[in-house]
Amino acid sequence: VSGGITNHGTVKLSGTATINNGGNFINNGVLDLINGSGSLPQNFVNNGTVIDSSAVKVQDILLSGTNFSLTIQGYPGHNYQLQKSETLASGLWSNIGAPRAGSGGLLMFTDTVGAGAKKCFYRIVVTP
């Protein structure tokens, strides 16, 4: 865009998408960068909300017997999947339950199958 941009709604960038503008980018809405690898637009003025990967934070963890529960903040327009692995090697992750859609509130995920039986790692995968 050769001039400025004013956002009053939601702008979502995924992958390597970027915004190139010649003037100010004024955000009065939501700039969603959770799944983007880019940075904030040039001449960025924020009067709204910026959601990036740092917004996906663990709110609560509970281990009770072999049950493991994890709570995060879920954002609309994204799906969240709990995964588990016995190693941190790529490609060895198993989905735990079904993906959950973000709605602006907290999302709780629970693994009821052997979380306490042996060492394992958990992660949340976010998709647009």
Image: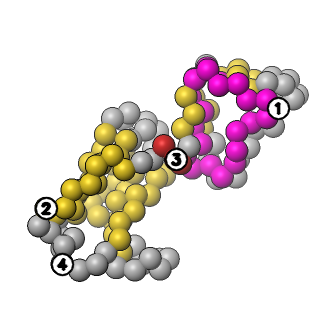
Q: Which residues are magenta?
A: 27-48
Q: Which residue is mark 3?
A: 54
- Of the numbered discs 3 and 2, the one sitting upstream in the chain is 3
The reply to whether the C-beta atoms of the residues labelled 2 and 4 are less than 8 Å apart is no
Q: Is residue 74 left or right of residue 11?
A: left
- Check contact, mark 3 vs mark 1: CB within 8 A: no
Examine the rendered structure and indicate whether residue 86 appears above or below residue 113: below
* First-in-chain label (3 vs 4): 3
The reply to whether residue 94 is visible in this rendering is no
> Residue 64 shows which numbered tag?
2
Question: Which residue in the structure is indicated by mark 1?
Answer: 21
Identify which amino acid the numbered label 4 is placed on.
Ala
Label 3 SS: helix
Q: Residues within 10 Å of mark 4 (few under 14, many from 20)?
A: few
* Disc 2 element: strand
Of pointers 1 and 2, the one earlier in the residue sequence: 1
Q: In the rendered image, which quarter is residue 19 located in?
A: top right
> Disc 1 vs disc 2: which is toward the camera?
2
Q: Secondary structure at mark 4?
A: loop
Please give the label number shown on residue 117: 4
* In this rendering, the label closer to the viewer, 1 or 4: 4
Colour scheme: secondary structure
Measure the C-alpha gap from mark 1 to mark 2: 51 Å
- Helix, strand or loop at disc 1? loop
Q: Quadrant of residue 107?
A: top left
Mark 1: amino acid: Asn
Q: Residue 127: where, in percent of width, then height? A: 48, 52
